[in-house]
Amino acid sequence: MARAEPEAGAGSAASPASPASPASARTGTVDGLQVVVTGASRGIGLAIARRLVEEGARVAMLARTASDLQQEATLMGERAWDVPCDLADGGAVERALERILERMGPPDILVNNAGAFLLGALGSTSGPDVQRVFDVNLAAPYRLTNAVVPAMRERGRGHIVTIGSIADRHPFPENGAYAASKFGVRAMHEVLREELRGTGVRASLVSPGPVDTPLWDPIAPDDRPGFTPRASMLRAEAVADAVLWVVTRPEAVNIDELRLTRS
């Protein structure tokens, strides 16, 4: 389900775009925009980074595995930049932000994508494993959003895209930690949307159903009753296309929420 709503006070004939706004921000493309994508070394994040680079954006790619991240950024060319960062570590997130602001300035778009997945019934999961899920899925998006929103507000434009999940609305057995983190980040998005309404800064939640990514490798969903077979899952590229669509809507339109399922 997509909910689109006019953005009060943004991009009308009576109020022309600020001279500081890049042309691409007014023409429905990402060409020349500065973008930060988390969890960008594989899966959905990598697909999003590739798609945005293909469309002309300059993308700072954040992920924990430095070697994989560097390899993928190198393959994408000069518009991609690897920023190794363990998003579960608040100090590492701060240092990554410092590097990004030094090199590219405040981003035009932030894509909060990185995610940690944990299966286990309540009462059977370990404290450190649960803490990592909360740190990556909820605390990191909060830290990053909190850091970039002030500059976006000041210039009257920008876009925060949060990648949600079917688990941010529907409960599944063994999904307590992951669902709690995703329900939480959806709540963060909804509060952010209310706070940004009328400022020219947009916030969108893109929530797919199951997506075939390496996240499923240790879980083997095809062998587990009740799980979606990988052949029936969405592809990461479909989510990337949805993100591109969301961020290239006219300035006066905000996609509050976009839910993706396999047809």
Image (cartoon, rainbow, N blue to C red):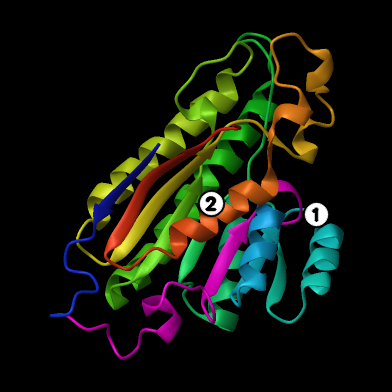
Q: Quadrant of the N terminus?
A: top left
Q: Position of residue 262 (x, y in %)?
A: 61, 32
Residue 32, quarter of picture: bottom right
Total residue callouts:
2
250, 140: nearer the viewer: 250
Magenta stretch, residue numbers:
15-44
Horizontally, residue 247 falls left or right of residue 154, namely right
Residue in view at x 67 percent, y 60 percent = 62
Q: Position of residue 5 (x, y in %)?
A: 25, 51
Q: Does 181 sit above or below residue 66?
A: above
- Residue that lies at the very extreme toward the front in this rendered image: 263
- Residue that lies at the very extreme toward the bottom in this rendered image: 19
Residue in view at x 27 percent, y 85 percent = 18
Q: Is residue 39 in view?
A: no
Residue in view at x 80 percent, y 54 percent = 65
Numbered badge on residue 65: 1
Q: Is residue 144 magenta?
A: no
Numbered badge on residue 242: 2
Q: CA distance from mark 1 to mark 2?
A: 26 Å
Q: Please identify, in this view, whether the residue under mark 1 or under mark 2 is nearer the observer.
A: 2
Crowding at label 1, few (<14), some or many (≥20) Cα neighbours within 10 Å?
some
Horizontally, residue 231 falls left or right of residue 7, namely right
